[in-house]
Every structure is written in structure tokens, then in C-alpha cells.
Image (cartoon, rainbow, N blue to C red):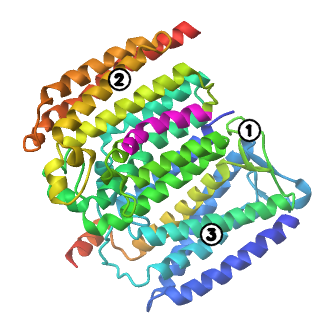
Amino acid sequence: MGVLYLLSLLLGITCMLLLDHRFRLFFWRDAKAAAIVTAVGVLFLLAWDLAGIGLGIFLRGEGTIATGLLLAPELPIEEPVFLIFLVLCTMVLYTGARRLLERLPARQAERERENV
Amino acid sequence: MTYLWLALAFIAAAVVAGLAFARLGARHGETAKHWKAVGIAFAALAVLTAVFDSVMIGMELFHYDPSHILGLKVGLAPLEDFAYPLAGVVALPGLWMWLTRRRGAGAKSNLKGLVPQAVLASRPVSWINTAYPFAAAMLLTTREIDWVLIVGTFYFLIPYNLAMYGINDVFDYESDLKNPRKGGIEGALLQPHLHRPMLWLAVITNVPFLLVLAFAGGPTTWLAVGVSAFAVAAYSVAGLRFKERPVLDSLTSSTHFVSPAVVGLALAGADVTPGLLILLAAFFLWGMAAHAFGAVQDIEPDRQAGIGSIATVIGARRTVRLAVVLWLVAGLAMLATPWPGPLAAIIAVPYIANCAPYWNVTDTTAARTNVAWRRFIWLNYGSGFLVTLIFILQWSLTS
């Protein structure tokens, strides 16, 4: 039983949240909306996983870096954590891209926020 | 081919949702930027997927039934795996844009400072007081560090305290305003606009851990976790306010510190022995004494705010004497536990010595006990040190 995969995912999530915090992109911009987007995204992708497992497409591996703990048949506890990471990564990339497209660096946006 | 059809079905749902959200949510002239950003994000995600999906498959984290996939691969990643990030990036940014459409680019975040406030409110100097009982109880029983121990210790270290003190500070706002002691080491005044977010933060950070801990144990654990979570909320939420019901306040407060140990014992499946029960009872009396003594210094502000506590009801002098007696009984009780438990009796002495000078305190001089209360916070570290030594001795005697 290994925790390497789980720790890597948690580390990835931490990094995404640090980016979010630094540039006020997602949770640090509108926590409620971000929580809803994250919940909807994770549930949608989890439903997809379950459908794939039900159809016999997805098979869990026996990798030594995973904990081997299962939430359901073929569904390891790492999967929802991975999905949270995927959603956070997606949203940080999107909101970051929007920020770049509007040519508004975080500091300037922040100053504007404070001046309103 | 099955995977392709499955992926197409979910992508179709995501595209429909994404188009609808973008239509509803885009302000004038925003649509083009939205889809451009979606494209940039997908390009980055596709690269990340090609690399990390290959790594994950290479590490044998998961694999696919070969008869169900197309067979086209990028690295080790089957083409269909790119459907996940595609669906996510098509639908979710639209949802985000729709949910945040009323906020201008310059809208002020009303959650500014929530996390620092929550951490300050949770009294980091006291985090160890709830994590230690859990970790010690579980480790001494199972004698190994497993994921339940790590998750549970983290839970009782931070989220548990965020909930306990966060909920408390929200519902105590009024009395705290009149208390100059709050705002530093012993707590923080919480801005009213952060009250609701603070309660949400408590729920979001606690519920997943409670579910995981319940999942890891049986009915005994469910009971222990339930009592623990109930005590955290019932202490201060409007309507229950156990902290304002004399005696029940001290009982509930002590439960805050003893219940983590009980959860640890339940998760570890400990045998219930007389010695263990005496130990828990002594710990519980210690916790009641600590709470009662802590309430003495707040008699004045609590009365002004119309808040009751064991100290406002039975008075400063009797509360101090009760605390001394409870610590004394706790110490004596430890003498009845199996060796090396009796060594722990000595831990009661500094608490009694710290508190006894106030044997004749009056309600008007009650605020002066704050000096002893500050010492009390640091005494706990010394006690933790002694308790740890005794646990190590116990470990070596039984191995």
C-alpha cells in the first residue's frame, strides 16, 4: 500500500490553490460560485467514471503507489481527489487565460477592486 | 468502441451545457474571449493529459479493457481519455461565467480575510490539545501509523478547531465585543460579514473528514464521532448554547478534548478495561476543571452581555474551589490506574498550585485570574511533555 499517488494529488491541489490565492482567480474571487463549479464538475466526472466502471471499460490497476483502498468496485479513494484536481486545474487555466486575454495583471485588478 | 460512445455521450451533454451557460452568462462582447480562453485552457490540459495520463498508466494505477477502446494512443494514453478534460473545459467555465455574471471585473470580494481570520479564531496555540489525545489514544492501541491515524490527527488538529472556535466566535460576537481579552492569543473578534462564510467553512472542512472517519470505523466510531461533532456545535450555536447552561457548559467543553481520544480508541478497536475508563474519567475531570477555571475571568463581560456560565451562576470563589477539587480528584484517580498510570497523578499538582492562590477570589477580582489562565495555556505544554514520557514508558513496558 502506497500513498505516493494520493500525496502527489494533494500536492497538486495545493499548488492550484496557491495559484488561485496569488492571482485571485477562482475560490479567492468568488468562493461560493467556485464551490458550486467544483461540486458540479466532480459529480459529473464521477458519474462518467461510474458509467465506465458499470460498462466494464475502466479497470483499477495494482500499482504500488496507490493505497488500494476502494470506495466502490474499481473506484479507488484517489479518484475523487484526482477529479477535484482536474477541475481546479481546468478552472485555474481558464480563469488565468481570461486574465491574460484581458491584459490585466493581478495587481492591477486588485488595485481596481480596492478602489471601487 | 464502447468507451468512445460513452465519451461522446458525456461530451455531448457537456457541450450542450457549456453552450447554454455561455449564452446565459456572457456579458456583451465577452463570448469571444470566453471561447478563446477555453481553447487555451484545453490546449494546456491536452498536453498535461498526454504526459501525466501516460505516467499514471505506466505506473499501473489503472488500465482499460482493450476490447472497449479504439486503440489510438498518445503516449500510453488512449485517445478517449482526452474526453475528460475536453468535457470539463467546455462546460465548467461557462457555469462559472454564468454564476459570476453579476460581478463586474472590479467587484470587491466580501470573503477577504476569511481564511486568516478563521485560523486566528481557531487558536493555533491550542490545536495540539485535540489532535494529541486522538493520536496518542489510537497509536498506543494499534501501535502503527496508518492512513486513518494520519487523516484523523489532521482532522483533530485543524478542521475540528476551525469548527469549534469558528462557530463559537460567530455566536459569541456580542460578548466578545465587550471583552478586551479577545483578539490575540485567546481568540479573535470576527467581523459580522464573515459570520456566515465562517459557518460554511466549518461545515465544508469538517463534514468530509467526519464521513471518512465514520467510514473507517464501525457503530462505536459512529457514536463517538457523532457525540464529538454534536458537542462542538451544541456548545455555542443559538438555540442550544450549552456554554450558557451551568455545569453542562463544563461537561460539553471537556467533551471537546476527551472525545477525540474516544474516537481514536473506537477506531483502533481498543479493549475497554477499568484502567482505561479511570484514565478517561480523570482526563474528563481535568477538562471540566480547566473550563470552569477559564470561565472565572470572564464573569464580568459575560454578565454584561447577559451570558451565563458555571462561573456567573455559582460565583468566582466557588468555581475556583470546584476547579481545584476536580483537579485533585483527577490526580487521585490516576493513582488507581495500572502502572505507569499513577505517575500521571503528579501532573495535577502544577494546575492546583496555579489555581489555588485564587481560593478566596471574589466576583470583582475575578478578572485577575487571567494571569493564571495565561500560565495555564503553557502548563498544558509541560503536561503534554510529561504525559508523552509516561506513554513512552508504557509503550516500552508493554512491548
The region drawn magenta spans B251-267
In the rendered image, the quadrant that contains the C terminus of chain B is: top right
Depth check, front residue: B197 or A13: B197
The residue located at (38%, 60%) in the rendering is: B237
Residue B253 forms part of the magenta stretch = yes
Label 2 is placed on what type of residue?
Answer: Val
Q: Residue B352: image x %, image y %?
A: 23, 23
Residue B246 belongs to magenta span: no
Of badges 2 and 3, the one in the foreground is 2
Q: Nearer the viewer, mark 1 or mark 2?
A: 2
Tag 3 subunit:
B
* Three-letter code, disc 1: Gly
Amino acid on which the number 3 mark rests in the picture: Gly
Considering the image in quadrants, where does the N terminus of chain B appear?
bottom right
Could you tell whether B58 is left or right of B148 in the image?
right
Occupied quadrant, residue B175? bottom left
- Which residue in the protein does label 2 denote? B329
Q: How many marks?
A: 3
Q: Position of residue B211 (x, y in %)?
A: 59, 51
Q: Is residue B7 left or right of residue B363?
A: right
- Whether marks 1 and 2 lie on the same chain: no
State the residue position of label 1.
A63
Determine crowd level at label 3: few under 14, some 14-19, many 20+ residues with C-alpha closer than 10 A: many
Under tag 2, what secondary structure?
helix
| Residue that numbered label 3 is attached to | B88
Q: Main secondary structure of the magenta part?
A: helix
Q: Answer yes or no: are tags 1 and 3 on the same subunit.
A: no
B52 over B318 or under it: above or below: below
**Cα distance in 3D space between marks 1 and 3:** 26 Å
**Residue at figure coordinates x 80%, y 61% from the top left:** A52
Distance in Å between CA atoms under marks 2 and 3: 61 Å
